Amino acid sequence: MRGRFITFEGGEGSGKSTHARLLADRLTALGIEVVRTREPGGSPGAEIIRHILLSGIAKPLGAETEAILFAAARDDHVRATIRPALVDGKWVICDRFIDSTRVYQGALGKVDAKLIRSLERVTVGAAMPDLTFILDVPATVGLARAKRRRGKGTADRFEGESVEFHEALRTAYRALADKEPKRCVVIDGRAPRDVVAQRIWAAVEQRLHPGPRVTETAAP
Ligand code: TYD
């Protein structure tokens, strides 16, 4: 059976990476094989494109070109990492995926929704997420967390945008979740870490039914 595909989405500092890790640990403890990955990146080819995108050198080319570059990275990532894992029955947990393109390049960058959908069809095909968590925090809270985490390092291409940009991201994510309630679950990322983790686990149990894996033993 095809494995399950779970994605985490949200603004900067929303806690996606922490909760992707906690969920992976919990599934692994049940004996489920989990591949944890992220975008942009997640495969050798896509990691090269990640550097181009996050350095900001592609910004002058415009949001449409950036969307095409994110799609190019995704194409490699799906082929090299995600699809093979799902075919093997593994569960894939990915930090950011198609919804980041819909929100950052689509809603905020004003890239035509039709282009974004066409890119999705080509790159993702049947490898659509079964479940997507949108971690929701006010922009000021998320940016402050991201800044603390970064320490003296400089903000990347998107962290450097204004508070208004990040608040608009949040609104766009919520609108997206309203449109696809079967796939998307919005979680209040301001709640204590354990509470957030428990809410995520409750949704996984309810929607994807992860049972403990029983390994077959050969008859004596
Ligand atoms: P990253 O350093 O992975 O940080 P985080 O996920 O913790 O925010 O940065 C990825 C950045 O790329 C992030 O600012 C969102 C942006 N992005 C897009 O604009 N479009 C996309 O399709 C993806 C996958 C990411």
Image (tube, rainbow, N blue to C red):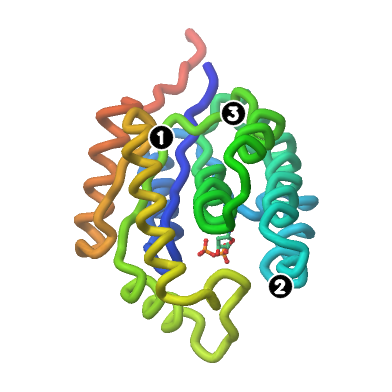
- Quadrant hosting residue 210: top left
| Residue 49 place in picture, x, y as percent | 76, 58
Can residue 163 be seen here? The reply is yes
Q: Residue furthest top?
A: 219
* Residue drawn 20% across the image and 62% down it: 191
* Residue drawn 54% across the image and 91% down it: 152
Q: Earlier in the sequence, mark 2 or mark 3?
A: 2
Q: Is residue 101 left or right of residue 59?
A: left
| Residue 37 place in picture, x, y as percent | 58, 49
Q: Is residue 109 left or right of residue 196?
A: right
* Residue drawn 65% across the image and 29% down it: 121
Q: Nearer the viewer, mark 1 or mark 2?
A: 2
| Residue 88 place in picture, x, y as percent | 61, 25
User: Gap between marks 2 and 3, in whole Å?
Assistant: 28 Å
Query: Which SS class for mark 1?
Result: strand
Q: Which mark is residue 131?
A: 1
Compared with 75, 66 (above or below) is below
Q: Which residue is mark 3?
A: 127
* Residue drawn 59% across the image and 28% down it: 127
- Quadrant hosting residue 128: top right
Q: Which residue is mark 2?
A: 55
